[in-house]
Image (cartoon, rainbow, N blue to C red):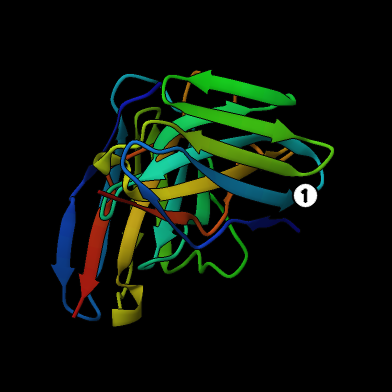
Amino acid sequence: GQNIDQPTEMTATEGAIVQINCTYQTSGFNGLFWYQQHAGEAPTFLSYNVLDGLEEKGRFSSFLSRSKGYSYLLLKELQMKDSASYLCAVSTTGGGNKLTFGTGTQLKVEL
Amino acid sequence: GAVVSQHPSRVICKSGTSVKIECRSLDFQATTMFWYRQFPKQSLMLMATSNEGSKATYEQGVEKDKFLINHASLTLSTLTVTSAHPEDSSFYICSVVGRGPDTQYFGPGTRLTVL
């Protein structure tokens, strides 16, 4: 089976930097995704990592270490609109493009 | 990416009735679509994989006779919740595998409330 762990909640200050961690245990790892989901809305794609290292995309960056089964999402220059749930998801070989989602991290950005 | 729509966005029905939810891929021909369910403050749980022109593949614990999936074309998949009960009240979301490797793009979701 697969096991994906994320912190349940985090709070950060507007303008600051926050790092959301995700650890996973799976066989046949084939990539890790981060999605953002605002309350009552569908998830939107943020990033995809399949190789070790950091992928930067504007204010958001995502890091992957396959050997450690670890990823993080880094959000810089936080804005109030970044308050949302951040979902870590893993795809596996032979899974037919299926994703297994973590429980999500609810981020609250405060003034 | 891919643009995905769902209809209806919100539906309220009586217990025992059936509800059909449509998922459309607007700019991409999707041989595979996924159906998820999300309860409040929980993550997405995959219900089934919808395959164009063939039977859907259901995840363990999901009743295929209760959640009927039809993927009749490359742009449309439907999920019918049959004989709905209050415990079926949830947020139902579909997704399409887009042009990126394995990347799924989600529809806006359908909020189902069964009275």
Residue at the spot x=65%, y=37% of the render?
Answer: A96
Asked which quadrant contains residue A52, the reply is: top right
Looking at the rendered structure, the secondary structure element under dot 1 is loop
Mark 1 — residue? A26
How crowded pointer 1 is (Cα within 10 Å; few <14, some 14-19, many 20+) is rated as some
User: Quick check: B25 left or right of A101?
Assistant: left
Chain ID of residue with mark 1: A
- The picture places residue A50, in percent across and down from the top left corner, at 69, 27
Q: Amino acid at mark 1?
A: Thr
Quarter of the figure with the C terminus of chain B:
bottom left
Residue at the spot x=30%, y=72% of the render?
Answer: B89
Q: Foreground: B48 or A24?
A: A24
Is residue A21 visible in the rendered image? The answer is yes
- The picture places residue B52, in percent across and down from the top left corner, at 48, 34
- The picture places residue B85, in percent across and down from the top left corner, at 30, 80
Residue at the spot x=25%, y=68% of the render?
Answer: B18
Q: Against B112, is A76 above or below?
A: above
Q: Foreground: A57 or B61?
A: A57
